[in-house]
Image (tube, grey):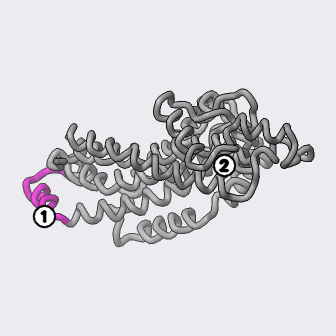
Amino acid sequence: MWVYIARRLLWLPFLLVAVSFVTFTLGRFGPGDPVQVILGTRYDPDSEVTKNLEAQFGLDKPFIVQYADYMWGVIRHADFGESYRYRGREVSSLLGSKIWVSFQVNVAAMIVSLGIGLPLGFWIAHKQGSWEDPTAVTTALILMSIPIMVSIPAVLWGMCLKTDLVPCSGWDGFWSTRMIVPAITMGIPGIAGFARFMRASTLDVMGQDFIRTAHAKGLSGIMVDYRHVFKNAMIPIVTLLSFALAGMLGTSFIVERILGIPGVGNFTIDAVFNRDYPVIMAATLLGAGVFVIANLAADIVYSVIDPRIRYQ
């Protein structure tokens, strides 16, 4: 197992280099000049101020030199550079607190998705053939098809404007009532997805020979479900969970923007509009790293759930 984990981790630097090169290239050759964004109406491509800023940020160097300097700072000192927008501020210091905020939002949403979706899907599988099964599946499909841009206003209208149960926006920590709206809006699509996949996985396991053998030995239904059905049904769900964790990063961008949550998603959107390339680069590298680590964690959890799984 440890050899497998080490081999997977060795691929991480190559992936990050490829992602960083593509992002760096798009940033440098795409439309928009960060110096022009900084100076605004005072921008003059031939002025001394413009040339000094380009020299300060290293924008006057050849492209490959700029990329090499950037990656050398990241690899050697974990230095993502200085923000173009916030002069004198390191990107790492700007992103630190915002990453923690986004992490809490995603954890809250995942708790909602898993806490409701998995038990619901397991229960629906045991109701196959009854009216509860198609009703629950249809409801899940409807919930999954609702864009988050639509669900947020609906939740705000019902829980904030009409009933005044929770604050409408802002951020005040994980245990604040302000967490309820983002957790629900980000968690609802996950509930539907996990419920559908858990139902399908559970039905597949329930049809296996070893489940019929367990019943034939006289084990109770609860014991069979606990010892055999649930654990084996969770194996394909782990893959879905790893992709859901990475996918929530994209969803949190929208939620943070609409609800005014000071997370990394909202900050990155501002960086895109401001052509703050060091921030964009750092956010892209962090997203790619999270995706790889999430998939590696899924492989590790496989072996925990099912000891028969071994990696070479």
Q: Which residue is at 44% across, 71% downward? A: 134
Q: Which range of residues does the magenta coloring cover?
A: 208-220
**Taking 81 as reference, is 66 above or below it?**
below
- Specify few, some or many for label 2: CA neighbours under 10 Å numbering under 14, 14-19, or 20 or more: many
Which residue position is annotated with label 2? 255
User: Pointers 1 and 2 in contact (CB under 8 A)?
Assistant: no
Q: Which residue is at 7% across, 54% downward? A: 217
1 or 2: tag closer to the N-terminus: 1
- Residue 165, visible in the rendered structure: no
Amino acid residing under circle 1: Asp
- Horizontal and vertical percent for residue 168? 76, 42
- Horizontal and vertical percent for residue 104? 56, 35
**Outermost residue toward the left in this view:** 217
Q: Secondary structure at mark 2?
A: helix
Q: Quadrant of the N terminus?
A: top left
* Disc 1 to disc 2, C-alpha distance: 45 Å
Numbered tag placed on residue 209 in the rendering: 1
Foreground of the two, 78 or 224: 78
